[in-house]
Image: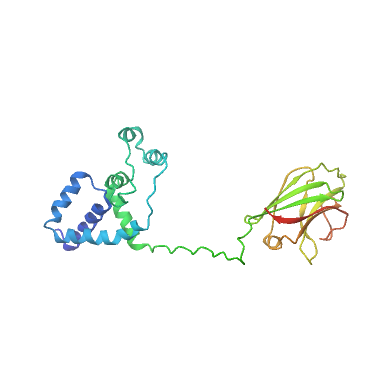
Amino acid sequence: MTTTTDTNGHEKLRGAEYVLGVLDAEQRREVERQLLDDPELAAAVEAWQERLAPLAEEIAATQPAAYVWPRILAELGLGGSVMARGAPEPTASGGLWNNLRLWHWIGIGASTVAAACLVLLVTLPRPTPSPAPVQTASTPPPTTFMVAKIEQNNGIAGWTATMDVTHHRMILVPATPQAIADNRSTQLWLIPPGHKPISVGVFTPDKTNSMDLPLTLVKQLSDKALLAVSLEPKGGSPTGQPTGPVIAKGSIGGA
């Protein structure tokens, strides 16, 4: 026995499939014939058009790259037979919802896909876009990278430091070979203005080093801070402050 609830549910789903354009040509003609004398189906179609149209208005027309359709068809396992017939291309003037061939290709397995999409469209809240940060003359854009040329006492560059502020990383690259005794270690320090040196870490002087930067240290990076290298006992300073001679230093600047 078919109940009124079952009929209404079928009409709503059929109306949604029609609006989405996932029906084939014969099914669309059948629905269009029914629309002439089926007020419930007509109401369902109108309701879905009103519900879905605002979503389409938010989508700017764009031309997909040439590789998009082959990749979609490959993921669906349709491959060469479908490609031989050619996949439809959306047109900028036709609009997303009016491009029936596009929705027909996307809507293979229409009833299942449409039903799932409709549940999501009805039940999920539409996300609210986050406002873009306002840049003013007194608020410069955030610095992503900072650099420092760490010079030896004779003025020759010893190392170049590049700091990725976003990902809290530093790359330290040697510029001039350094002769360091086996019983000593080179240790890098950050010296914020008016503060004691903060250890960045012990590093290998003649190789490229990748170093993690704690958030507390990243917050101290500025164009007024310095980087310095000291010679320490093997393994680093035992006191947390430089104990040996400072052999190179350099100021920090934005990249």
Closer to the camera in the image, 40 or 192: 192
Q: Position of residue 5 (x, y in %)?
A: 19, 63
Image point (33%, 55%), residue name: 117
On the image, which quarter does residue 39 sit in? bottom left
Closer to the camera in the image, 58 or 23: 58
Count of numbered marks = 0
On the image, which quarter does residue 213 sit in? bottom right
Q: Position of residue 131 (x, y in %)?
A: 49, 64
28 lies left or right of 198: left
Quarter of the figure with the N terminus: bottom left
Work out whether residue 7 can be spotted: no
54 lies left or right of 154: left
31 lies left or right of 131: left
Residue at the limit of the structure toward the left, as seen here: 37
Closer to the camera in the image, 27 or 183: 27
On the image, which quarter does residue 254 sit in? bottom right
In this picture the colour scheme is rainbow
Image point (24%, 62%), residue name: 47
Q: Position of residue 248 (x, y in %)?
A: 83, 52
Q: Does 67 appear above or below 27?
A: above
Work out whether residue 219 can be spotted: yes
Residue at the limit of the structure toward the front, as seen here: 137
124 lies left or right of 114: right
Q: Position of residue 25 (x, y in %)?
A: 20, 44
